[in-house]
Amino acid sequence: MVETRVSQHLVPPEPPPEASQPGALVWLRKNLFYSRGSTILTVLVGAVILLFLRGAVGFLLDQGRQWEVIPRNSANYSIGSYPRENIARTWVSLGVVAFIAGLATAAWRPIGRVSPGQISAAVRSAGIAALVLAVLAPSTFGGRTEFLIAGAVLFVIGQAALMALGDRAIDAFLPTLVVLGAGLVAFLVVLWILPISSSTQIPWTIVIAAAVVAFGVGRALIQPLGAPTVKRSVVALALFALPVLYLHVQRAPEIPWDRVVDWSAWIIPIVVIGYAAVIFVSGAEREAAAIVNGLLVVASIVVWFVSAPMAARFLLLMLTAVSLATPTFGSGEKGRRTVIAVWTGVVLVLMYLFAIGVGTPTLETNNNYFAGINLTFMLAIVPMLLAFPLGILMALGRTSTMPLFRLMSTGYIEVIRGVPLITVLFFFRFGVLNFLPPGLQPDAILLAIIGITLFAAAYLAENIRGGLQSIPKGQYEAAKAMGMTTAQMTMLITLPQALRAVIPAIVGQIITLFKDTSLVSIIGLAEFLRVANNIVPGQPDSLGTKLENLVFAAVVYWVFTFTFSRASLRLERRLGVGVR
Amino acid sequence: MTSNGKKEPIIVCDGVKKWFGDFQALRGVSTEVGEGEVVVIIGPSGSGKSTWIRCINRLEVHQEGRIIVDGIELSSDVRNIEKIRSEVGMVFQQFNLFPHLTVLQNVTLAQTWVRKRTKAEAEKKALDLLERVGIREQAAKFPGQLSGGQQQRVALARSLAMDPRIMLFDEPTSALDPEMIKEVLDSMKELARSGMTMMVVTHEMGFAREVADRVVFFDQGQIIEEGTPEHFFTDPQHDRTKLFLSQIL
Ligand SMILES: Nc1ncnc2c1ncn2[C@@H]1O[C@H](COP(=O)(O)OP(=O)(O)O)[C@@H](O)[C@H]1O
Ligand SMILES: [Mg+2]
């Protein structure tokens, strides 16, 4: 028998039960010593950690360690054996990079905040670390008292700050920007007070000033221009600055004006035809546009078989690309203005690059490649930037319905993924010269960049393909049902989602790439690790002790990869908003 | 049978056949839909209803027969299928909103890229439509933050923003909790009264009774019976129709 029951009154919601803060002892018992087995394990693991720490501390603080070798070699670490009489060139480059970084910071204001509580806790942890170091230090270590005092002071400051902040420790926030600024100021103070490297004080100050000024300029521009325009300009500026800086540091070319004049017989007509073509295509019917684009495709192929300057061939290729994209992205009144601007930009950039690219180097480049951490960064950042569009193209190719395109992409990916990076590097350093026209002698860094780019693109393509396959069919159908073309659907719907889905994989790849740049030492480039392993002989400021340098190198790699993976975690969380 | 006193037919299907491998999903579908007509399609699961209406905006490609939409025959010769699709809106069972874009961006995206409207025009239109389906205040959210019923109304606004001449609905309320079905159906009823040409696959008989000009019973890849809602709910002729109606009513 089922009895009928009717609720007499609605129960109002109650607050959740108070979560009691467990004391330290309770926590220990619950997490480390909750059974006999766990107690044994805790003691064992604790002993291993202690032994390891003791060994590490003993190594770090041993009397024989010469840590001063690292600041002494700061120039070697930064630029290797780049000729010191030309060092101003590298500072100018750094200044330009700092300027762009300042602009970028203004355009994409780093959101995120740091709480004073976190800072206080960090100070307290540093104090604890110093105390542990002092206790564990080997008996020969002379600075024990100083460490004890410093540790105690830091601990007390951190703890006092935490207690003073009380509840506000977690709610109050400092914007990241303030922390960033404070970091820069602290860097300058250290630079001017500690006698580390007196020759770099002024250039560093100027570099940081450039960043700060750029930040101000960026903020001032956002009002009148709007944030999107500023962002786009910063990206364009960065992309344009990279090759210019490279040539400026690496070759210091003289522009061959007579050759530029020779080209103009080809260039000027192409530029004029270019304007006519994109203006026509952006307003034309589909069929008419297709005819013009077809003619351009044919012309851009034919021009490789007649004697024409390289600059003209590439310019025509770019024109074809711009014109092919015009029906999709550049129709209508606004679209027309965009394609005209794009074409103008393409002409200027390409011509400038060609002019300085073919110029005679005034630097003796053969032995003086710029090196050190700068080279490492360049070999990680530039190939990654270049590999992105290439990898996306390959991923789309491999998933496309066009058999030729698919075959090419698949073949490329499988070949590159089947060989070690070193093989690719060797091929580009030594093998590729056989395929180039004589007289064209790209330098080793450029070849390494190309090799790493092609290598990274293959892996990137596979990652992105995975992302594309994870997009539900309904997304394609919804996009098509609204009348989007395949290109629009890819650029606006599927690719952005695919890229988001594979951020973790891509981050892993970038980290691997960053560390793999150390392989270029095999083809004779002095990147960061090689400098560390073999502090360049013949430099007056080299002490040449290896262990300290290798430990330092490991720490530097770790700091950068760790920071990067943290930052990307935040990015993931931020982009995760829209995920269903 | 098809004229219903309406104007020119805007959709014409004539002997449409479609196979998936060896399996024939459509076995010769012929009918006409007049401008402003609301056609409700009912039928058992797997009978080919989705396949049929997806052929009308060429998400599926039929192999035999003719489909003419707004005077243009759909065939592999059609140069500009995007143009036709932009005139035919579609609302899916699974909403298919773009999860990486906000509600507002979902509704403006195709307007700016396909209809080439300026951003301001597109946003005004989007906000008006969101207002009309009752979720204007959700414009800045992402689809994942909305309930199913709200998502489906965004999907409706997204299609309407293209100013389509025809709207196709494929079981728009089947993935919704019962209490959300009404809010979506209300928006669809309002649309029907505004004179939109609609083809609606649904099991909501109340909706069919209230707004349909014609009900089509579909089974085994073909039209078994069609007529007014009145006819269907009082005097169905075919045995299959009777069986089906007895099962769902
Ligand atoms: N892409 C496909 N490949 C193979 N068979 C399909 C495909 N789509 C649908 N079908 C089959 O076609 C028939 C009709 O499907 P559908 O049109 O979805 O039916 P309904 O919408 O009436 O439930 C079903 O038997 C289904 O299994
Ligand atoms: Mg269906």
Image (spheres, coloured by chain):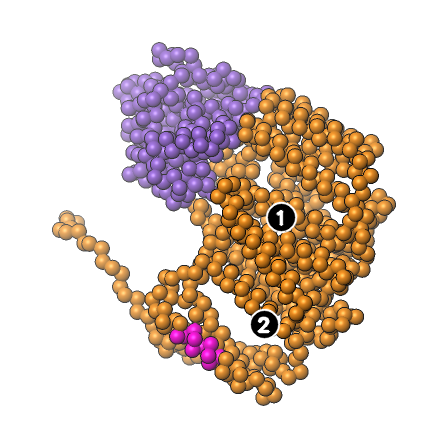
Chain colours: A orange, B purple
Is residue A157 inside the magenta stretch? yes
| Magenta stretch in the rendered image | A151-160
Q: Write down the quadrant of residue B194 in the picture.
A: top left
User: Ligand 1: does it lie within 8 Å of the C-beta at label 1?
Assistant: no
**A570 and B44: which one is in front?**
A570
Relative to A292, residue B101 above or below: below
SS at badge 1? helix
| Residue depicted at 45% across the width and 37% down the height | B105
Q: Write down the quadrant of residue A556 in the picture.
A: bottom right
Disc ID at residue A193? 2
Residue A118 in percent (x, y) is at 43, 66
Relative to A302, residue A8 above or below: below
Q: Is residue A345 visible?
A: yes
Residue highlighted by disc 1: A238
| Residue depicted at 50% across the width and 63% down the height | A182
Q: Is residue B45 visible?
A: no
Relative to B150, residue B29 above or below: above
Asked if badge 2 and badge 1 are on a common chain, one would say yes
Q: Residues within 10 Å of mark 1 (few under 14, many from 20)?
A: some
Q: Tell which subunit mark 2 falls on.
A: A
**A482 and A289: which one is in front?**
A289
Q: Are marks 2 and 1 in contact (CB under 8 Å)?
A: no
Specify the amino acid type for callout 1: Ala
Magenta: predominant secondary structure element?
A: helix
Is residue A367 found left or right of B194 in the rendered image? right
- Mark nearer the viewer, 2 or 1: 2
User: Ligand 1: does it lie within 8 Å of the C-beta at label 2?
Assistant: no
